[in-house]
Image (spheres, rainbow, N blue to C red):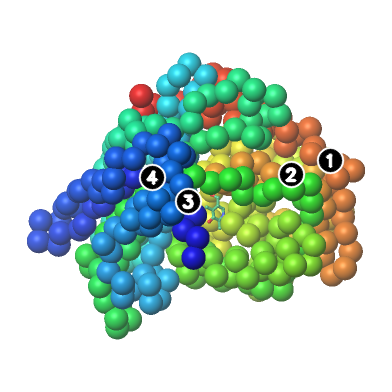
């Protein structure tokens, strides 16, 4: 009933034209209600406005709606200390989106077009006030309470009902207001018997169909009193894979940071890649390799999960087969906190962007 998905008023829609092999672009302006006007509306007016913003005219019956045949991206635009706005590594999202579309066997959205459309998307919505302003109070607490714009580019198929591959896909970019992915004091994780991804499957692409398993396993973990779920590998049920929709790291007592190596069951997270670079720049040895649950429980000093929505979220303990391994006395560990400080500092323009990761919008 309550329509609380706070979509931004302006969305981007590109439709693939097989004849010209190009993507025809269109800006869908649902309304010109500014952010402040929206906040002043009564709930009925607000609901009507937001419901209208969710109507992009995509086919109801499609490979996407019927078979979970689709892919998406999650990326953020950040207000900076100097008043500018930047998107964090959209070129990496563009490359991963192309990789996902190749994995789906459909026409691939060009990477340069993805970045250009993302920048223009933020610029147009920001004109109507849909961009938070930087608050230096965020700096205390490592930007844990800071705001950003969460962008959701996605692919949707043409209208279709028989099982098949998309030939005339659409690409949409929209954005919504999001609250923090994890909340509350509990940061316990638990392993699950469910399998997120199997070898030769779709686990290495950001494919819509993958997230049913994540949602089920996460709900089961939450119902059992945990914040997060940890998936193990399909074959031996022994090696760490990922969190519900985040990558996982363990900082070993030996001083080595380990994370599962990429492959067709691990999603190549951009936060993951950034954390690896930042840790190495700190002189920390990082190993991308199989990490068994036994090793993670016996030898881990810290554990954290990473993702655009999650940032770097500390894990206080992992419970596996009824045994709980506790990290850093259940407190966020110094290594994860330092990495969070560096990552968020770059994203919000409070620290120098020596890697050139930020793409400026305005
Ligand atoms: C999106 C996602 C991640 C994190 O990727 P980021 O690029 O860091 O946001 C990790 N695992 C899964 C399964 C994901 O879908």
Cβ atoms at labels 2 and 1 below 8 Å apart: yes
Q: Earlier in the sequence, mark 4 or mark 3?
A: 4
Residue drawn at x 25%, y 73% as measured from the top left = 159
According to the picture, the residue beneath numbered tag 1 turns out to be 331
Q: Residue furthest bottom?
A: 162
Residue topped by disc 3: 43
Q: Earlier in the sequence, mark 4 or mark 1?
A: 4
Q: Residue furthest top?
A: 82
Query: Which residue is located at x 20 percent, y 58 percent?
Result: 16
What residue would you read off at disc 2?
314
Identify the secondary structure beneath mark 2.
strand
Where does residue 203 sit, x and y in percent of width and height? 52, 64
Q: How many marks?
A: 4
Task: Give the alpha-carbon distance from disc 1 to disc 3, as whole Å.
Answer: 40 Å
For marks 4 and 2, give the one nearer the viewer. 4
> For mark 4, does the 10 Å Cα neighbourhood hold few (<14), some (14 to 19), or many (20 or more) residues?
many
Question: Is the residue 46 above or below the residue 83 in the image?
Answer: below
Percent across and percent down for residue 325 are 87, 55
CA separation, marks 4 and 1?
37 Å
Q: Locate residue 166: give its quadrant.
A: bottom left
Residue hosting label 4: 8
Query: Is 304 positioned to the left or the right of 300 in the image?
Result: left
Helix, strand or loop status at disc 4? loop
Q: Which residue does the image show at 48% across and 31% down from the upper left?
A: 132
Label 1 Cα neighbours within 10 Å, binned few <14 / some 14-19 / many ≥20: some
Q: Nearer the viewer, mark 2 or mark 3?
A: 3
Q: Is residue 338 left or right of residue 58?
A: right
Which-is-in-front pick, marks 1 and 3?
3
The Cα–Cα distance between marks 4 and 2, rounded to whole angstroms, is 31 Å
- Position of residue 94 relative to residue 160, above or below, is above
């Amino acid at each position: 009933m309550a329509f609380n998905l706070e979509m931004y008023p302006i969305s981007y829609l590109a439709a693939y034209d097989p004849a010209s092999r190009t993507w025809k672009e269109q800006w869908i302006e649902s309304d010109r209600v500014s952010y402040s006007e929206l906040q002043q509306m009564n709930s009925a007016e607000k609901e009507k406005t937001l419901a209208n913003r969710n109507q992009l005219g995509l086919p109801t019956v499609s490979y996407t709606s019927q078979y979970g045949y689709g892919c998406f991206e999650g990326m953020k635009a950040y207000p900076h200390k100097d008043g500018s706005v930047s998107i964090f590594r959209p070129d990496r999202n563009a490359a991963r989106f192309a990789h996902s579309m190749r994995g789906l066997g459909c026409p691939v959205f060009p990477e340069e077009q993805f970045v250009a459309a993302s920048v223009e998307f933020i610029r147009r919505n920001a004109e109507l006030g849909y961009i938070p302003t930087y608050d230096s109070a965020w700096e205390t607490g490592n930007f844990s309470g800071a705001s950003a714009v969460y962008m959701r580019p996605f692919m949707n198929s043409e209208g279709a009902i028989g099982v098949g591959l998309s030939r005339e896909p659409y690409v949409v970019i929209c954005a919504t207001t999001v609250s923090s992915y994890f909340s509350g004091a509990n940061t316990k994780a638990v392993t699950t018997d469910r399998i997120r991804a199997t070898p030769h499957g779709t686990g290495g692409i950001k494919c819509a169909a993958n997230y049913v398993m994540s949602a089920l396993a996460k709900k089961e973990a939450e119902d059992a009193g945990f914040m997060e779920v940890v998936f193990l590998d399909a074959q031996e049920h022994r090696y760490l894979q990922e969190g519900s929709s985040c990558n996982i790291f363990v900082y070993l007592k030996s001083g080595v940071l380990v994370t599962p190596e990429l492959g067709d069951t691990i999603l190549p997270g951009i936060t993951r890649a950034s954390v690896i670079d930042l840790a190495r720049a700190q002189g920390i040895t990082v190993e991308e390799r199989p990490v068994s649950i036994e090793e993670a429980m016996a030898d881990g000093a810290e554990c954290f999960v990473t993702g655009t929505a999650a940032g770097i979220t500390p894990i206080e303990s992992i419970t596996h087969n009824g045994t709980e391994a506790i990290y850093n006395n259940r407190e966020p560990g110094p290594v994860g906190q330092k990495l969070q400080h560096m990552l968020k500092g770059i994203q919000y323009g409070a620290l120098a962007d020596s890697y050139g990761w930020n793409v400026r919008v305005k």
